[in-house]
Amino acid sequence: MNDGSPGGLDRRRFLGLCGRAALLALLPLPLRPAMAANVPQDRVIGFLNTHTGEKLICAYREGGVIVPDAIAAVSHILRDHRTGEVKLIDTRLLDLLADISRRLEAHSPFHVISGYRSPATNAAMRRAGRGVARRSFHIQGKAIDIRIPGIDTRILCRAALGEHRGGVGHYPASDFVHVDTGPVRHW
C-alpha cells in the first residue's frame, strides 16, 4: 500500500498519508489505531478465503496509522460468503492475528473458514444445529475461524491462548481455531 519509494517521504507518499489521516478522523473509534506502545508501526496480514478462493496480503497499518483502503479490502475478503454482506472488521482482531502469526513465525496467510457472518446466516446456522452462539462475535466483525497451512491447529490454538486477548476455541474435527476479541475464555 505504499508507492514503492525507497524510504523517502516524497510528495505522493506525503499526500497519501495526509489523506489517510483525514479519513482516519472520520472513522468510528473502534477503527482508530491503538496507541499502545506494544503495537508495531507497520502491520501486514494475509488471508485466503477458503470459500471464494480470494487471497489478500496487505499492510493494514502504516506508521501506526490504520490504512482505510486495506481495512475495506480485509472486510471484503472476510465478508459473509453466503450473502455477500460486508461488515468492518475490528482492527483489534487484525492486531491479534498479526501477533499470533508473528508468535508462530508463520509465513502463510490465514486460511479463513468463517469471518463476518450476517445475522441471517448466523440464525440459519443455529437452526441447523451447528453449535453457533446466538450473539456470536462473528456478527460484530470481531471473530474469525482460521487455520494456517503447515501449522497444527493445536499449536495455533496454544499461540492464540498465549495472547490472552479474547475467546479461543479449538475444533480439531473441523481443523480450525476460532479467535475473537470478546472476553478472555476458551473451549
Image (spheres, rainbow, N blue to C red):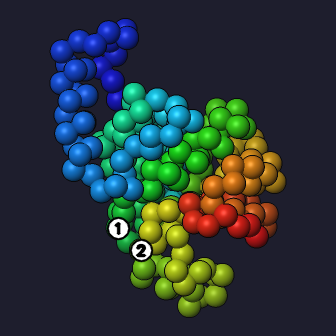
Q: Residue at x 44, y 56 (%)?
A: 90
Indicate whether 165 appears above or below 34.
Answer: below
Nearer the observer, 154 or 83: 154
Nearer the observer, 100 or 78: 100
| Left or right: 157 in relation to 167 | right
- Residue 47, horizontal then vertical, whole percent: 52, 45
Can you name the residue that lies furthest to the bottom here?
127
Q: Residue at x 60, y 80 (%)?
A: 132
Q: How many marks?
A: 2
Between the residue at mark 1 and the residue at mark 2, the CA separation in whole angstroms equals: 7 Å
| Left or right: 69 in relation to 132 | left
Indicate whether 48 appears above or below 3.
Answer: below
Quarter of the image where the N terminus is located: top left
- Residue 46, horizontal then vertical, whole percent: 52, 40
Would residue 65 be seen by someone viewing this image from the given angle?
yes
Q: Are marks 1 and 2 in contact (CB under 8 Å)?
A: yes
Quarter of the image where the C terminus is located: bottom right
Q: Which mark is residue 85?
A: 1
Dot placed on the residue nearer the N-terminal end, 1 or 2? 1
Residue 10's image quarter?
top left
Secondary structure under badge 1? Answer: loop
Task: Name the residue beneath numbered marker 2.
Answer: 118
Kind of residue sitting beneath label 2 = Ser
Nearer the observer, 100 or 77: 100
Q: Residue at x 37, y 52 (%)?
A: 31
Kind of residue sitting beneath label 1 = Glu
For disc 2, the neighbor class at 10 Å (few under 14, some 14 to 19, many from 20) is many
